[in-house]
Amino acid sequence: MSTKNPHLEELGQFLRARRGELDPTVLGLPAPEPGTRRVPGLRRVEVATHAAISQDYYNRIEQGRLAPSTPVLDALADTLALTPLQRTYLEGLARRADPRTTPPRRPAPARPQLQRLLDQLILTPAFAVGKYLDYLAWNPLAGALLLDLDAMAPHERNYVRLLFADPRMKDFYDDWETMARTGVALLRMQAADNPRDPRLADLVGELYEDYPLFRQWWESREIASQDFGTKTIHHPELGAFTFDWDSFYPKGDPDQHITVWSPAPGSASENKLRILSARLGSVPPTA
């Protein structure tokens, strides 16, 4: 195992990935002639020059050997045209690289009170997800819609793992590739807190070895953050459901979040939810 600071390593690799995406013309440089560059994107010296630092200084940052100062970090973010979310990710890595930073918390199970809350939502699919996108708790509707979470082994109940390991998922979502790529980006965002966490290492190691697309997207170091949206799923018996969804973060544990799926009132999805709920014994079907 590397003895380098894992947050500095990830910071350097993240900068390298973003550097590889940018065309030199972004910095006002002439478009490269075909075949004149061995790798895509900007060269290290071009990034360093634009950020007003030495190439050696920048090399050490990318190699995970040096923590950049805040002004340098800002200059690099500007040079690489980072989005606000990417800046937040980069700043978080730099902050966590400081040995005085509080050590990351270990993932915790869902509290019993949370399970009770979920169970009380009898006409609303809802579930709790942990730091590395493990399903921690769910109500009967969510369990049934998510291809029977109750029947899965504990290690299988991970959102990203299911997207790759369960072949049903390619029919479950309208656009599996977008969902899977976003799932990898969400996992990468969560990994910033503790890149060497054993649970994370086991999950990423399994998926990295078995699924080339996961490996490609993990190496791209894309990140994502989602709090609400709309999605369509396809239940094998009841067909398509369309939900608006929102995520909420319990104050007692910011590493967990509750996601609630809500159909439009009077919609076919709402009617099918009543049918499913009646099958589960939660509520009687409407007349």
Image: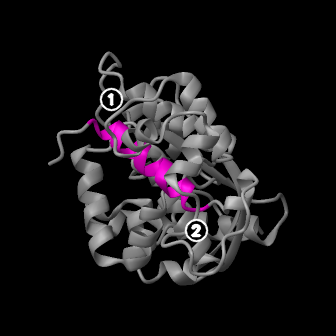
The reply to whether the magenta stretch includes residue 17 is: yes
Question: What is the crowding at mark 1: few (fewer than 14 residues within 10 Å), some, or many (at least 20)?
Answer: few
Which secondary structure dominates the residues rendered in magenta? helix
In the picture as drawn, the residue positioned furthest to the top comes out as 100
Provide the residue span drawn in magenta.
Answer: 5-21
Residue linked to disc 1 = 104
Q: Position of residue 89 (x, y in %)?
A: 53, 39
User: In this rendering, does residue 261 appear at all?
Assistant: yes
Question: In the image, 270: left or right of 67?
Answer: right
Circle number at residue 179: 2
Residue drawn where x is 57% and y is 75% of the image: 36
Q: Position of residue 44 (x, y in %)?
A: 50, 51
Question: In the image, 212: left or right of 270?
Answer: left
Picture layout, residue 38 above or below residue 259: below
Count of number-bearing discs: 2
Question: What is the crowding at mark 2: few (fewer than 14 residues within 10 Å), some, or many (at least 20)?
Answer: some
Name the kind of residue labelled 2 in the image.
Answer: Met
- Spatial CA distance of label 1 from label 2 is 28 Å
Picture layout, residue 35 above or below residue 25: below
Q: Position of residue 265 (x, y in %)?
A: 83, 58
Residue drawn where x is 29% and y is 59% of the image: 203
